[in-house]
C-alpha cells in the first residue's frame, strides 16, 4: 500500500515525503511542477508529473498504484496573487480538489489529510485562535481553502471519505540534513526574504508596517517548524487509519513573534547585519495571528519539539546559505 502525496515537489510536500520514507512508507508523488521542483522529490518515491484537474491522468495514477491514503498539498498559495487572479485559485484549488475527491470515490480511497490555513479565519476577534472560532477569509486564497474544507465535509457525509484538515500558521525552517528547503519564485515570505538579505541577494528587508497596535508596532505571527508540521500529518494519517472521525486542527506553536523579533533573531543566527527599512502596511495583513494548537495536541497527541524561533531560523539558514539560488543553483559547501 502507498501514500499518495499531491504536491510532493513543493516546500511542505517534499518534507512530508522525506519523513514518510524515513518511516518506511511507500510513497507516490504527484506534482505539476507549476511551483514545485523536480529535485525536491525524494529519489525513492514513485513520481508522476501532471495536474490534478486532469481526470484521466489522476485515474491512471490511482489505477497503477495501490493507494491507501492521500496527503493533499497541491494548491496555489499566494495571498496577493489570489486577489489578482481569483479564478486561477478557484480552478486549481477548488476544482482540483473536486476532481481528486471524485477519483478517490471511484477508487474507494477514503482517507485524506489536507493542508489548510490560518487564512480561513481572517482577522481574528481574539487570540489564540481556536478551531471553533468564526471563519471569515479576507483573501481568495483563504476562501478557496475554506471551500475545499467544506467540500470535504459533505463528501465525508455522502461517501464516507474521512478527512483531517490542518490549518497551518506560519511554516518555516527546513529538514536538518539540508537536502530540501524553501524555494519559492517569487519569494514572498518573511524568513526566506530576511535570509536572502543576509546573503546580500537583497539590499534590505522592507518591514510592512510599523504602526500596528503591538509592542514594537510590527505584525505578530506564530511560526512553526516544517518538520513539526509534518509530524502532525503523520499522526493525522494514523488517527484516520485507527477510525478517527473527520476533524479540523490548527497547527502553530501558541507563541507569537513580531517582524522585528524575527529580523533580530536572524541577525544573531547568521552573524550578518541584515539592513531593514520601514515600508507601508501590506493590504490584508492582520496585526496578530497566534494559534491555539491544544486540540491537535489533545486528539492527535502532537508534540512539536522544534518550537524555538532560533532553531527554525538556524535550520532555514542551513538550507539558504548552502543553496543560495535554491534548487537551480545546486548545493554549495
Ligand atoms: N513581512 C514583512 N516584509 C516582507 C515579508 C513579510 O514585513 O518582506 C511581514 C508580513 O507583513 C507579515 C509577516 O512578515 O506580518 C509574515 O509574512 P509572511 O508573508 O511570511 O506570512 P503570512 O503571515 O502572510 O502568512
Image (cartoon, rainbow, N blue to C red):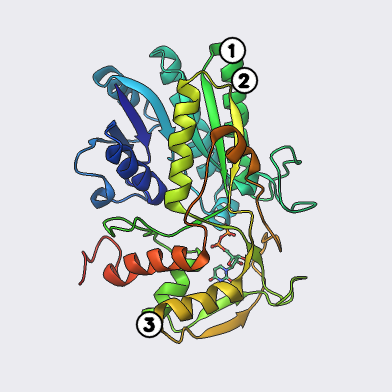
Taking 280 as reference, is 307 above or below it?
A: above
Q: Residue 80 placed where, x, y %?
A: 57, 58
Could you tell me which secondary element the residue under label 1 belongs to?
helix
At 43% across and 60% down in the image, what residue appears? 173
At 44% across and 42% down in the image, what residue appears? 231
Could you tell me which secondary element the residue under label 2 belongs to?
helix
Q: Residue 292 placed where, x, y %?
A: 67, 48
Q: Say the numbered circle drawn on residue 210.
A: none
Q: Residue 33 placed where, x, y %?
A: 32, 46
Label 3 CB, ligand 1: below 8 Å?
no
Residue indicated by mark 2: 154
Taking 128 as reference, is 160 above or below it?
A: above
Could you tell me which secondary element the residue under label 3 belongs to?
loop
Q: Rate crowding at label 1 as few (under 14), some (14 to 19) or many (20 or more) other CA atoms within 10 Å.
A: few
Quarter-wise, where is residue 143 in the image? top right
Q: CA distance from mark 3 to mark 1?
A: 54 Å
At 66% across and 68% down in the image, what residue appears? 219
Q: Quadrant of ligand 1?
A: bottom right
Q: Say the numbered circle drawn on residue 200.
A: 3
Locate residue 312 relative to residue 300 in the image: left or right.
left
Q: Rate crowding at label 3 as few (under 14), some (14 to 19) or many (20 or more) other CA atoms within 10 Å.
A: some
Q: Residue 45 placed where, x, y %?
A: 23, 37
Quarter-wise, where is residue 44 in the image? top left
Q: Quadrant of the N terminus?
A: top left
Q: CA distance from mark 1 to mark 2?
A: 6 Å
- Which circle's residue, 3 or 2, is located before the other in the chain? 2
- Which circle's residue, 3 or 1, is located before the other in the chain? 1
Residue indicated by mark 1: 158
The residue closer to the viewer here, 201 or 14, is 14
Locate residue 195 relative to residue 295 in the image: left or right.
left
Amino acid at each position: 500500500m502507498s501514500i499518495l502525496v499531491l504536491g510532493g515537489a513543493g516546500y511542505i510536500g517534499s518534507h512530508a515525503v522525506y519523513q514518510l520514507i524515513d518511516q518506511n512508507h511507500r510513497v507516490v508523488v504527484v506534482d505539476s511542477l507549476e511551483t514545485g521542483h523536480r529535485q525536491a522529490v525524494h529519489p525513492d518515491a514513485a513520481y508522476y508529473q501532471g495536474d490534478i484537474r486532469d481526470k484521466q491522468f489522476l485515474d491512471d495514477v490511482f489505477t497503477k498504484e495501490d493507494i491507501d491514503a492521500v496527503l493533499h498539498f497541491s494548491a496555489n498559495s499566494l495571498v496577493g496573487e489570489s486577489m489578482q487572479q481569483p479564478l486561477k485559485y478557484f480552478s486549481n484549488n477548488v476544482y482540483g480538489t473536486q476532481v481528486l475527491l471524485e477519483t478517490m470515490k471511484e477508487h474507494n480511497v477514503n482517507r485524506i489529510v489536507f493542508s489548510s490555513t490560518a487564512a480561513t479565519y481572517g482577522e481574528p476577534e481574539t487570540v489564540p485562535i481556536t478551531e471553533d472560532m468564526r471563519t471569515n477569509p479576507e483573501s481568495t486564497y483563504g476562501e478557496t481553502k475554506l471551500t475545499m474544507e467544506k467540500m470535504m465535509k459533505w463528501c465525508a457525509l455522502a461517501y464516507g471519505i474521512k478527512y483531517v484538515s490542518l490549518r497551518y500558521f506560519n511554516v518555516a525552517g527546513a529538514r536538518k540534513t539540508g537536502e530540501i528547503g524553501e524555494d519559492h519564485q517569487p519569494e514572498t515570505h518573511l524568513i526566506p526574504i530576511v535570509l536572502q538579505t543576509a546573503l546580500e541577494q537583497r539590499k534590505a528587508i522592507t518591514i510592512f508596517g510599523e504602526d500596528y497596535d503591538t509592542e514594537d508596532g510590527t505584525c505578530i505571527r506564530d511560526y512553526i517548524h516544517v518538520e513539526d508540521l509534518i509530524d502532525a500529518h503523520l499522526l493525522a494519517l494514523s488517527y484516520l487509519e485507527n477510525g478517527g472521525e473527520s476533524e479540523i486542527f490548527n497547527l502553530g506553536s501558541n507563541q507569537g513573534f513580531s517582524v522585528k523579533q524575527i529580523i533580530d533573531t536572524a541577525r544573531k543566527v547568521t552573524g550578518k547585519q541584515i539592513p531593514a527599512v520601514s515600508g507601508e502596511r501590506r493590504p490584508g495583513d492582520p496585526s496578530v495571528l497566534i494559534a491555539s494548537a491544544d486540540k491537535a495536541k489533545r486528539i492527535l497527541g502532537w508534540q512539536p519539539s522544534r518550537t524555538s524561533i532560533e532553531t527554525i531560523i538556524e535550520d532555514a539558514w542551513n538550507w539558504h546559505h548552502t543553496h543560495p539560488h535554491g534548487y537551480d543553483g545546486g548545493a554549495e559547501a
